[in-house]
Amino acid sequence: MSTEAATEAALAKPVPLPDADSAPFWHGCRQDKLMIQRCRSCRSFQFPPSSVCAQCGSDQIEWVQASGKGKVFSWIVVVHPVPKPVYAADVPYVVALVELDEGVRMPTNIVGCDSSAIVADMPVEVVFKRVSEELVLPLFQPAGA
Ligand SMILES: [Zn+2]
């Protein structure tokens, strides 16, 4: 690896690596659909994806499109570009746990508002950020923004 390539690799942001369980989630994002799992046995929603239900252990799992609506459960404002300098252009940014209307909590970023405007239980809605042809990230913004 050349020095330039090594530097570029060191600066690159990590990206999600879909596996057998999460591939339908990432495929849905590419189609602007927020997909979560629901158990056919006990009807529980779950996220993150798994091959079995976290509530009852059933392997009868189906994918359903979530409403894309939820509320801020918790959040932090990142002001230091760690762990990599490549984040320097992004700070400050908000890392949050959003509780979807379906009841599952999803780690994400809050965008579209000043971080000081965020409050607990603030209504938010999904917005999809196209990072590349293969990668689309589900972020959340204030509802109705
Ligand atoms: Zn279940």
Image (cartoon, rainbow, N blue to C red):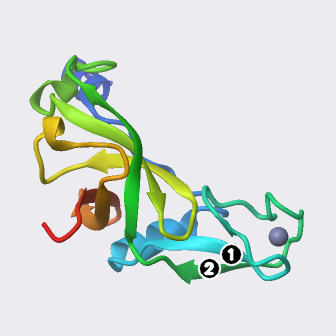
Q: Residue at x 30, y 35 (%)?
A: 13
* Residue 15, placed above or below residue 53: above
Helix, strand or loop under label 2 = strand
Q: Residue at x 88, y 70 (%)?
A: 58
Reading the chain from its start, which is encountered first: label 1 or label 2? 1
Disc 1 C-beta below 8 A from ligand 1: no
Please state the horizontal and vertical placement of residue 25, each as a whole percent of the image: 51, 68
Q: Is residue 11 left or right of residue 66?
A: left
- Is the Cβ of the residue at disc 1 closer than 8 Å to that at disc 2? yes
Front residue of 138/85: it is 138
Q: Which residue is mark 2?
A: 63
Q: Which residue is mark 1?
A: 38
In this view, the mark in front (1 or 2): 1
What amino acid is found at the position of numbered circle 1 in the picture? Arg
**Quarter of the rendering occupied by the C terminus:** bottom left
Q: Is residue 116 left or right of residue 132?
A: left
Ligand 1 quadrant assignment? bottom right
Q: Is residue 43 left or right of residue 124?
A: right
Q: Residue at x 39, y 78 (%)?
A: 33
Please state the horizontal and vertical placement of residue 134, each as a whole percent of the image: 35, 64
Badge 1 crowding class, 10 Å Cα cut-off, few under 14, some 14 to 19, many 20 or more, is many
